[in-house]
Image (tube, rainbow, N blue to C red):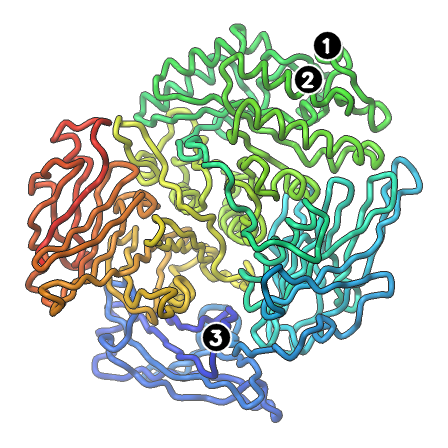
């Protein structure tokens, strides 16, 4: 028997207003349900009434309700028992901690948090704090005297939410060439009794960031800001439902992190690698929620980093695209790293690509990863190798890069070949003996350990190198090890070389490859704020987390969790997020595939030769007009739906992205198991997915939800719930499409219509490029322009159900589609009209001269 509730246990739910509906789903197995007979299960909400003075908890009986009276999307095939109650804000307005207990006749009372081995749920009632206009109102101690703070207000706006400040402190120059200037500035300590918990984007090694959550959660349990490592961003949830966001602003000359003090205070940590004192800045935002707070902080980070002014700014979105995205981002890619490792030769690479094509996997891009370069070393591992010349290793690649590209492209579908290189050339830099050393000035750093191209030659070096690659037929690059600019360079060298290398790489990559460049191991604040913040810079692909580790089972849930939470910060940069490669023939292949599909970033595989799972390949790709494989990438970048729930709670992580044309946006919600144990149910409110529906803003009153794994479709209201079910290591993706009401029969009847996109692909909703819905007195017309071929799903909800399924005409590219390619859903897919676009395309013998508009005309 499984218990699921909303608001969830092991979660913090912020609500507007003074009450929240509590709904509990009890899912007995068929045998348990039969054994119950006419006996009744009873459920109760056990809560602390907002931390009443006497400390007593209260038990509220829940009311059983019929399934017909509960608006829940569920894929469970078994009967579900539903219970409802209401939690009301106490007079103090304080948050409420709660759990659920239930009783089965003949057995003792059971507690849901014990059964699930999880913590209580918390409900926070959002309150208006308009009277508090100074940030010091939220801190128990003011900043130290050396810190100044200034209110920031966007031009043309008022002082209403969000409220923003910038804290400024001086970072001295270093006393010695080998050591940077360093300062710790106390910004203040959030008042413990006003904080529920915090979430932070924290350093992970020198190359990456990862999410970190406070150890304790709840009123009176918060123990201060104590992250184990320095952070770029921290968000604090207050008892009044507001979020306080701190964001350190780094520049080419300085790095600013956040750390915790012994008393739980937030400390700004400044490092200065330049030759003169500089200002360190931290933006602090008080906002309604995390999304608004981080967005506002990044807006001002952009203004501060690019223009150096904080008092005024024109209102514009941070990260707004300047150039149209390169189609390269939508192609299926193959990378050699986990597939072939470092044992690269001409034959092994060509054979691997040939194997993909022989298996029916028509990748458009091939990424040749580490160890194709000409290197010399006496070291046993890559970290001692040094780069000697531009051309590939002459023994492993006797025909050079040009010959390798030629043979790879004998597979006619390959359009792009990319190569990997380290930002310093290779892991241990440049060899002091060789062609590169003979043609470019080198600098010796770290007492002779490493040679790198000098600042005076780095611009010419990168331009020459990428010009050479381009001449060999290379059309994209992966610039890795970028953290070495931060990690290995002494302070004086870093102050000179980091900005020079960042600018030289950015300029050359943009000049020769456009947006076809991957920035890897580069989640270093100075690099992020220098190369990837401003919308005026090229929009490159940025690795969003640490690597995919195929042989580490415990790494897979964390990989998805980390990427989803890192995206809260990184998605605001001017980048395409890269959640890394994965393998289709793998125990966690579908799990990773689903995450990549909805991430908003590229999809690329690293399959071992001869080991492919075509069922997964077919879920992550669809065929274009000419038979090429394309991936279906959403129009937004995916992020976690729940910011303050830690990995240790083991609740399934919910990841959401948005797709669809202007005026018709579809939400895709991925649910991923973190527990690795028994199957787990969870619930989310549709309002958390689509927002509060307001007249003239978000007007949809109903939505159609489609589960990819179960292929279940259902109509739900704007105040409904989605109950998810995932198996051990399992996942599902639900598409939430707005219902468009269409008046027919002189306005007396109404048909609700929604578009799901392609049903067989994980991110099939992203196949809908344009949507048009219209009607006349007797016919409803739905037009969908598709990005690729597949099975199109259109949901209909009739006032008069007897009209359902009366299809009058379907056309594809203006040609009539035979009836055999159109079907009407029944059972769990009732309401879904399916058009086999791929089958019809082949039957009608269409090609790229025809468009991919599908029109479905059905009875009104």
Cα–Cα span, label 2 and label 3 = 57 Å
Give the vertical position of 146 relative to 521 (above or below).
below
Residue density around tag 3, few if under 14, some if 14–19, many if 20 or more, within 10 Å = some
Q: Residue at x 56, y 16 (%)?
A: 469
Indicate the position of residue 852 as horizontal and vertical percent values: 23, 37
Label 1 residue SS: loop
Q: Residue at x 77, y 60 (%)?
A: 267
> Which mark is on residue 15?
3
Q: Which residue does the numbered mark 1 point to in the structure image? A: 434
Could you tell whether 816 is left or right of 325 in the image? left
Cα–Cα span, label 1 and label 2 = 8 Å
Earlier in the chain: of badge 1 and badge 3, it is 3
Q: In which quadrant will I find the N terminus? A: bottom left
Instruction: State yes or no: discs 1 and 2 in contact (Cβ < 8 Å).
Output: yes
Q: Which residue does the numbered mark 2 point to in the structure image? A: 387
Instruction: State yes or no: discs 2 and 3 in contact (Cβ < 8 Å).
Output: no
Return the residue found at the far front: 156
């Amino acid at each position: 028997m499984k218990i699921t509730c909303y608001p969830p246990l092991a979660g913090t739910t912020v609500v507007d207003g003074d009450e929240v509906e509590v709904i509990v789903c009890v899912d007995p197995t068929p045998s348990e349900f039969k054994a119950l007979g006419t006996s009744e299960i009873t459920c109760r909400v056990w809560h602390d009434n907002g931390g009443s003075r006497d400390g007593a908890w209260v038990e509220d009986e829940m009311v059983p309700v019929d399934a017909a009276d509960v608006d829940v999307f569920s894929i469970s095939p078994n009967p579900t028992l539903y219970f409802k109650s209401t939690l009301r804000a106490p007079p103090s307005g304080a948050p409420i901690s709660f759990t659920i207990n239930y009783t089965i006749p003949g057995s003792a009372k059971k507690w849901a948090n014990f059964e699930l081995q999880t913590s209580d749920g918390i409900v926070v009632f959002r309150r208006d704090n308009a009277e508090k206009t100074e940030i010091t109102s939220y801190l128990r101690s003011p900043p130290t005297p050396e810190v100044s703070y200034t209110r920031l207000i966007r031009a043309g706006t008022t002082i209403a939410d969000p409220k923003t400040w910038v804290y400024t402190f001086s970072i001295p120059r270093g006393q010695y060439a080998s050591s940077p200037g360093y300062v710790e500035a106390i910004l203040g300590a959030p008042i413990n009794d006003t904080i529920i918990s915090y979430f932070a984007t924290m350093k992970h090694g020198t190359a990456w960031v990862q999410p970190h959550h406070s150890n304790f959660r709840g009123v009176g349990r918060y123990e201060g800001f104590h992250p184990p490592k320095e952070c770029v961003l921290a968000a604090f949830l207050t008892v009044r439902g507001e979020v306080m966001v701190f964001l350190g602003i780094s520049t080419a000359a300085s790095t600013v992190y956040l750390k915790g003090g012994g008393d739980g205070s937030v400390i700004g940590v400044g490092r200065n690698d330049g030759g003169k004192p500089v200002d360190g800045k931290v933006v602090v935002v008080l906002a309604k929620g995390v999304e608004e707070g981080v967005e506002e902080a990044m807006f001002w980070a952009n203004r501060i980093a690019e223009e150096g002014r904080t008092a005024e700014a024109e209102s514009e979105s941070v990260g707004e695209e300047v150039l149209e995205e390169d189609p390269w981002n939508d192609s299926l890619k193959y990378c050699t790293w986990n597939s072939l490792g470092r044992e690269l030769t001409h034959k092994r690479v060509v054979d691997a690509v040939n194997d993909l094509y022989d298996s029916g996997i028509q990748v458009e891009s091939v990424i040749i990863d580490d160890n194709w370069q000409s290197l010399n070393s006496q070291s046993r591992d890559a970290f001692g190798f040094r780069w000697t010349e531009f051309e590939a290793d002459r023994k492993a690649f006797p025909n050079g890069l040009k010959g390798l590209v030629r043979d790879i492209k004998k597979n006619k579908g390959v359009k792009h070949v990319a190569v990997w290189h380290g930002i310093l050339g290779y892991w241990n830099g440049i060899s002091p003996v060789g062609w590169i050393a003979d043609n470019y000035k080198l600098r010796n750093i770290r007492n002779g350990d490493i040679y790198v191209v000098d600042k005076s030659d780095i611009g010419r070096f990168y331009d020459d190198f990428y010009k050479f690659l381009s001449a060999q037929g290379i059309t994209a690059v992966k610039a890795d090890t970028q953290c070495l600019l931060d990690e290995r360079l002494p302070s004086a060298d870093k102050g000179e070389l980091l900005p020079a290398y960042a600018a030289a790489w950015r300029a050359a990559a943009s000049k020769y490859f456009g947006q076809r460049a991957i920035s890897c191991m580069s989640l270093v604040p100075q690099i992020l704020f220098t190369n990837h913040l401003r919308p005026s810079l090229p929009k490159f692909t940025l690795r969003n987390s640490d690597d995919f580790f195929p042989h580490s089972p415990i790494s897979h849930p964390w990989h998805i969790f980390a990427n989803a939470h890192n995206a809260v910060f990184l998605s605001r940069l001017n980048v395409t997020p890269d959640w890394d490669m994965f393998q289709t023939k793998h125990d966690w292949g579908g799990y990773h595939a689903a995450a990549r599909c909805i991430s908003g970033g590229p999809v690329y595989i690293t399959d071992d030769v001869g080991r492919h799972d075509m069922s997964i390949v077919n879920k992550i790709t669809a065929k274009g007009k000419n038979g090429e494989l394309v991936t279906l990438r959403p129009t937004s970048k995916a992020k976690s739906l729940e910011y303050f729930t830690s990995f240790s709670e083991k609740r399934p992580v919910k990841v959401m992205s948005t797709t669809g044309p202007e005026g018709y946006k579809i939400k895709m919600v991925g649910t991923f198991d973190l527990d690795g144990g028994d199957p787990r149910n969870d619930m989310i409110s549709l309002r958390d997915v689509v927002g509060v529906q307001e007249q003239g803003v978000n007007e949809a009153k109903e939505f159609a939800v489609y589960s990819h794994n179960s292929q279940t479709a259902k109509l739900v209201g704007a105040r409904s719930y989605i109950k998810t079910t995932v198996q051990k290591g399992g996942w599902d993706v639900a598409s939430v499409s707005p219902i468009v009401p269409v008046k027919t029969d002189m306005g007396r009847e109404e048909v609700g219509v929604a578009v799901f996109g392609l049903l067989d692909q994980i991110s099939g909703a992203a196949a809908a490029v344009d949507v048009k819905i219209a009607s006349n007195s007797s016919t409803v017309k739905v037009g969908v322009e598709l990005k690729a071929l597949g099975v199109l799903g259109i949901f209909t909800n009739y006032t008069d159900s007897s009209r359902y399924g009366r299809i009058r005409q379907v056309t594809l590219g203006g040609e009539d589609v035979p009836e055999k390619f159109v079907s009407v859903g029944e059972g769990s897919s009732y309401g879904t009209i399916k058009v086999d676009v791929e089958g019809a395309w082949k039957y009608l013998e269409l090609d790229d001269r025809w468009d991919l508009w599908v029109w479905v005309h059905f009875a009104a």
